[in-house]
Image: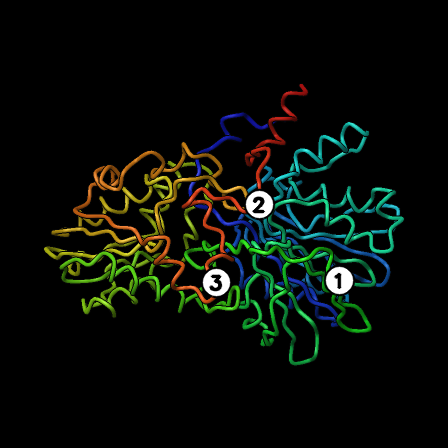
Amino acid sequence: MAEPLDELFTEYEKKEKCGIFGIWGTREASQICYQGLFAQQHRGQESAGIVVANENELVAHVGMGLVAQVFSQRILKEDLAGHAAIGHVRYSTTGASKLANAQPLLRRYAMGPVAVAHNGNLINAQLLRREYEDAGHIFQSTTDTEVIVHLLAKPSHMDKPDALACSLRHLQGAFSLLFLYPDRMEAARDPWGIRPLALGKTVDGCWVVASETCAFDAIDATYIRDIEPGEIVRIDEHGLHSRFFDKPADERAKCVFEHVYFSNPASKVFGQTVHLAREAMGKQLAREAPVEADYVMPMPDSGRSAALGYAKESGIAFEEGIVPNRFVGRTFILPNQKQRDKAVAMKLNIIPDVVRDKRIVLVEDSIVRGTTTRSKMRAIRRAGAKEIHLRVSCPPIRHPCFYGIDFPTSEELIAHNRTVEQIRQFLEIDSLAYLSIDGMLSCLNDDKRHYCTACWSGKYKVPVEEQVSKFSFERDQLRMF
């Protein structure tokens, strides 16, 4: 039965892309992959999947829900026995949340079976898909990732000495990828380095790849380095081999939102520890937007590091006045605003004795649509706060993202065509200030030219010729009937 349009085209909050993990060379591959995915659960809570290499075959198990819900010990040990594995946790930025879109995608073509796990967003996927459908190709999902398999299966690509490199050169946008074949695992990253992808090694000498280094901590592996932009790393029984399918872009486009919000504070992303980057942003925010107050309080959980930095720089006492319910999960994953508001009420417990009659500096990582933020502010006001001064550790988000963050239209963004004062009035707070773009970039360890600031500045380093929404492929399917 077709999904109703009003279910497909729901409202958006800030939403993560995906997390990927891969390991080669151990009979415990599926169990270790499970641990790596569990450590990256914050990157996607809609679906999870693992594909293992077992002799000359690939075996998959995917499902809707959290990692712990999708896999059991029996499935990991019996159904997913193998010497290598890749896994994926998903939030859908292209294609609806349904089982057909769960990854890794496992397909069979003329060269045998292949599985692919993807973090990012392909901005030319719609164009490629139309081309292949017009040629008679059949797609089994509505995710942009599937076009990659069709590129691999193109006869003119299979005839090339390096079919994978040839295929990747046709992709535009953000892609950190893991491929699993019966005889090898390959990891690749787009030439702009938009999404993170790290290489590590276990104490037993097995190579591992993950979106975030916190996955290495979970399995007692050592972070070695990042996969370079434009690089393919092949891992097989002979070890690790590196090659480049394209030269790195002169100016990278590393997503600053990874540091602002998405990544685990314990992770090293783009060569920099996330907690320290956020703390530096909080210090810079205190310098740019000081205010007299009794307490600095974080908005759990991603605002905590920035709030700590703000408190250190300002000299205002740091206080925990909001207690998160750890069992609710990230509210942005929920499919509509009514459910998200209910989840916020369940997730955040205000401590009245801490906030009552106090002037509070509340530090938040970002504001996207603003409706959920307003419900948080109202809850704090009801708890008796005398003044609420909201400080945001990134600039106002005024432009859509086409590289893997789910706010694809300007109209959904509260800061689009609104002043900071208008946003303050909407949020019903006493003052509001954002971190400047230059201030934010000054907290990062690479040259500012190598970061993507498109959602704040509107400057897209990777040209977007055709704007694709999350449900573009669903719309195309519906038009066929």
Which amino acid type is marked by label 2?
A: Val
Which amino acid type is marked by label 3?
A: Asp
Indicate the quadrant containing the C terminus: top left, top right, bottom left or bottom right.
top right
The residues tagged by marks 1 and 2 sit, at their Cα atoms, a distance apart of 28 Å
If you read the primary sequence from the N terminus, does the residue marked by circle 1 or circle 2 appear first?
A: 1
Query: What x and y, as percent, mark residue 451?
Result: 49, 56
Q: Is residue 14 left or right of residue 431?
A: right
Query: What x and y, as percent, mark residue 276?
Result: 40, 69
Indicate which label's residue lies in the foreground, 3 or 2: 3
Query: What x and y, as percent, mark residue 4?
Result: 54, 25
Q: As drawn, which residue projects farthest toward the front? A: 250
Numbered mark located on residue 462 in the image: 2
* Label 3 secondary element: loop
Numbered mark located on residue 447 in the image: 3
The residues tagged by marks 3 and 1 sit, at their Cα atoms, a distance apart of 32 Å
Q: Is residue 112 left or right of residue 419?
A: right
Query: Residue placed at 78% from the left, 46% from the top?
Result: 107
Q: Quarter of the image holding residue 473?
A: top right
Which residue has dot 1 on it?
185
Query: Residue placed at 64% from the left, 40% from the top?
Result: 143
